[in-house]
């Protein structure tokens, strides 16, 4: 898995003492592709191999394995750098613009054949490899996979079926399951418009645009039944049936099945049911969740897949187990209670929401309309069904809560960080009134990130040079990462700075494009091309603009912020990005406040806002910043993962002791804001945290960053980067996370040796 440094892929922008190359995603000036060159210069053999190359490129594009292999990404980019960027890094869309002949001629021109052949062989070997971690540790899953349900999957920016953290987590989960060889299939929805693209108008206000995705440009194909037929599932409601077809996407070794309501048989309105992620009203939502949960289980059955474990990632899919119970009653003749007990032992539930209001809840009428026919089949009363979704089953005032039903239908439940575990046990304690809080059966498995997806190739090469051979197969092991302490500080610093320069180039390109689009003056566009300074301490903030994340916290004291930013000797600069939910007006005002700082002479060019935060923007940011800022109102950040991505690339976290950071920070591997306490009055908490934040930046971050030795190196800072990498990278990796799920949830649920997660 080591990446051979292929210098032909790299435009040497800044080759330093340590030979670190700043890989270009440079603005390509002109396509050099010519067509028809091949025609006369080759014979039959050439044409045959041209077709073979073309087929191999397609095979690479159709398996999302490519998304975490920089050497494959560079093949696609080299085929046509301009179109690659214009097409949102989508290789399927790109290859559709090529004929086999044109591809062969381009491959000849760019000397791509051996790289394509090599990548293709590696993919084949990967797919065939049976000596995986799971073969030894999760063999009990055997032929009965884990069915992993999630409402969104963030696999790549070119596949718009995610909105943010939850989706990226699911994508990373699936990729690590593939890497570890865990027998798992994913179940989700295919949104043909996905989540919105964000642009700001000239007042700095967010505008949402939904683009239609062309199915032909997606790496999907119809999922087939064992008889080789395309599949349509049917879910009955009191108001007629809903239909969904099923797509298949291949993510390494893992198959992901996506349900899509745009089919004949549905009303025009229902055909749009799955067009947008988190669009529409309560009714859209319950119908989407019905399709995901109940439709998902039916799809598995139609595919001939018999899961050993059902993993509900968040409550959206929690109707699913009811359908499994129905199957069990039908197939095995079990009564409802017994079937429920059986199914619950096979079900794993992950909750993500620390805010009571954040959990999906539906009124009785809505539930009866959509679950009525299934309830009949289960032979239970309306009150019984509603009781499953209520904390107090008999309370007619209480709506049906997806988290409650998820907890009641699973025997393994977990939160997504240690702190979130405490919060969740307290929040749901009433479900187990006879138990004390510590005994509430909700454990925690802290989220992690898929390292190869988020690691810059320059850092990967540095690790390749210093870590044990094949380290990437062992990236969940602490020992592997200790080797970072043997790296020369200058080499690490130079690599980091190469990445920082790439971020700055990216930001300038984006920000000037934003100005041009808004029709601003040439001077403004030109100024945007020169924002930020590579020698200045750069702090990044990229996340959803939900108000509890407090993007504007620093602006509570604008004078003090101005003093920081305009310090003559030791200035600080900021890059912000993030979308607000379309219905979140206060969140949009936060965006406006930040974005409009560009009109304030104190902050112009020093605090910039990049539009349309997605996996691509996130990747640039987390790979290039010096510091990643996170200042949510504790304890509302269940885990957070973007800071974990920063760790891998040598950035340092500066965060409230919330989510994953509360268990990660040890005093030497980043920076903490405050002491992990909150006041019951938000205004007081905000005031205090603002003070803590300024103090941390002024007293710790800035002095350490600018404290240089004779070689210009910030020794203490680099030491902290190394501590961050060695203590955090493996622990907050998705490999560790999936191994934990396998050990503590999947294997026991599939009938392996039981292992108590709460006493971990
Ligand atoms: C990683 C990632 C997130 C998660 O960020 P947190 O705010 O740390 O939870 C959200 N959106 C995108 C696009 C990401 O890549």
Image (tube, helix red, strand yellow):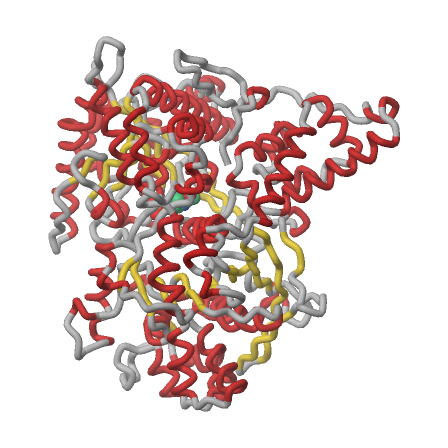
- Left or right: residue 359 compared with residue 288: left
- Position of the C terminus, as image quadrant, is bottom left
Observer-nearest of 679 and 134 = 134
Q: Position of residue 533 (x, y in %)?
A: 35, 18
Q: Is residue 456 above or below residue 440?
A: above
Is residue 163 visible to us here? no
- Residue at horizontal 36 percent and vertical 64 percent from the top: 745
- Left or right: residue 128 compared with residue 365: right
Q: Is residue 524 above or below residue 327?
A: above
> Could you say which quadrant of the image residue 258 lies in?
bottom right
In this view, which residue lies farthest toward the top? 710
- Residue at horizontal 54 percent and vertical 80 percent from the top: 237
Is residue 69 visible to us here? yes
Q: Is residue 372 above or below residue 672?
A: below
Observer-nearest of 734 and 527 = 734
Q: Position of residue 422 (x, y in %)?
A: 20, 60
Total marks shown come to 0
- Left or right: residue 547 compared with residue 739: left
Q: Position of residue 292 (x, y in %)?
A: 50, 67
Q: Position of residue 505 (x, y in %)?
A: 45, 23
- Residue at horizontal 42 percent and vertical 37 percent from the top: 471
Q: Quadrant of ligand 1?
A: top left
Observer-nearest of 47 and 430 = 47
């Amino acid at each position: 898995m080591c990446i051979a440094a292929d210098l032909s892929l790299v435009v040497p922008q800044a080759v330093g003492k340590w030979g670190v190359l700043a890989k270009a995603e440079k603005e390509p000036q002109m396509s050099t592709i010519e067509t028809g060159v091949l025609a006369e210069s080759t014979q039959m053999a050439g044409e045959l191999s041209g077709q073979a190359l073309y087929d191999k490129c397609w095979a690479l594009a159709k398996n999302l394995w490519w998304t975490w292999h920089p050497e494959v990404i560079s093949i696609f980019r080299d085929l046509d750098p301009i179109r690659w960027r214009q097409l949102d890094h989508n290789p399927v869309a790109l290859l559709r613009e090529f004929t086999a002949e044109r591809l062969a001629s381009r491959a000849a021109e760019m000397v791509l054949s051996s790289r394509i052949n090599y990548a293709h062989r590696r993919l084949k070997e990967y797919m065939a490899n049976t000596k995986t971690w799971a073969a030894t540790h999760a063999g009990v899953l055997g032929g009965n996979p884990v069915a992993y349900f999630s409402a969104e999957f963030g696999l790549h920016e070119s596949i718009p079926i995610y909105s943010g953290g939850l989706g990226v987590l699911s994508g990373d989960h699936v990729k690590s399951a593939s890497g570890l060889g865990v027998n798992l299939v994913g179940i989700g929805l295919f949104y043909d418009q996905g989540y919105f693209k964000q642009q700001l108008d000239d007042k700095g206000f967010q505008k949402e645009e939904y683009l239609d995705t062309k199915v032909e440009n997606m790496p999907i194909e119809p999922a087939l039944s064992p008889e080789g037929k395309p599949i349509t599932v049917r879910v009955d409601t009191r108001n007629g049936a809903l239909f969904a077809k099923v797509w298949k996407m291949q993510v390494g070794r893992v198959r992901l099945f996506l349900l899509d309501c745009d089919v004949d048989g549905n009303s025009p309105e229902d055909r749009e049911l799955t067009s947008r992620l988190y669009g529409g009203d309560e009714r859209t939502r319950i119908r989407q969740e019905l399709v995901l949960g109940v439709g998902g289980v039916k799809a598995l059955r139609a595919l001939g897949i018999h899961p050993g474990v059902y993993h509900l990632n968040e409550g959206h899919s929690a109707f699913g187990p009811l359908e499994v119970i129905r199957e069990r009653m039908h197939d095995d003749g079990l009564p409802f209670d017994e079937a429920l007990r059986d199914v619950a032992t096979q079900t794993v539930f992950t909750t993500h929401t620390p805010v009571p209001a954040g959990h999906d809840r539906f009124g009785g009428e809505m539930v009866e309309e959509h679950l009525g026919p299934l309830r009949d089949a289960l032979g239970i009363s309306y009150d019984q069904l509603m009781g499953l979704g209520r904390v107090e089953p008999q309370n007619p005032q209480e709506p049906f809560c997806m988290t409650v039903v998820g907890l009641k239908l699973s025997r393994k439940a977990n939160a997504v960080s240690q702190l979130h575990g405490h919060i969740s046990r307290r929040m749901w304690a009433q479900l187990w009134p006879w138990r004390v809080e510590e005994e509430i059966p909700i454990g925690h498995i802290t989220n992690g990130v898929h390292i190869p997806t988020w690691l810059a190739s320059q850092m990967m090469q540095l690790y390749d040079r210093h870590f044990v051979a094949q380290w990437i197969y062992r990236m969940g092991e602490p020992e592997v990462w200790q080797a970072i302490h043997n790296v020369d500080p200058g080499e690490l610093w130079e690599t980091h700075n190469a990445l920082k320069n790439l971020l700055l180039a990216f930001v300038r390109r984006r920000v000037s494009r934003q100005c041009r689009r808004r029709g601003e003056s040439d001077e403004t566009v030109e100024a945007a091309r020169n924002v930020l300074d590579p020698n200045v301490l750069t702090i990044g903030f990229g996340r959803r603009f939900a108000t509890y994340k407090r993007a504007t916290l620093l602006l509570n004291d604008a004078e003090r912020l101005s003093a920081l930013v305009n310090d003559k000797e030791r200035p600080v600069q900021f890059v912000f990005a993030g979308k607000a939910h379309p219905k979140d007006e206060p969140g949009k005002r936060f965006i406006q406040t930040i974005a409009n700082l560009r009109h304030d002479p104190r902050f112009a060019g020093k605090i910039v806002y990049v539009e349309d935060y997605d996996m691509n923007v996130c990747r640039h940011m987390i790979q290039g910043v010096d510091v990643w800022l996170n200042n949510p109102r504790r304890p509302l950040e269940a885990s957070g993962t973007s800071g974990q991505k920063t760790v891998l690339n040598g950035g340092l976290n500066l965060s409230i002791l919330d989510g994953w950071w509360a268990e990660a920070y040890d005093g030497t591997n980043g920076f903490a804001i405050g002491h992990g306490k909150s006041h019951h009055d938000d205004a007081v908490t905000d005031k205090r945290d603002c003070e803590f934040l300024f103090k941390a930046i002024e007293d710790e971050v800035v002095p350490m960053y600018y404290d240089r030795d004779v070689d210009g190196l910030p020794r203490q800072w680099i030491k902290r980067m190394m501590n961050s990498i060695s203590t955090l990278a493996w622990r907050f990796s998705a490999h560790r996370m999936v191994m934990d799920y396998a050990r503590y949830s999947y294997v026991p649920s599939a009938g392996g040796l039981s292992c108590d997660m709460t006493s971990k």
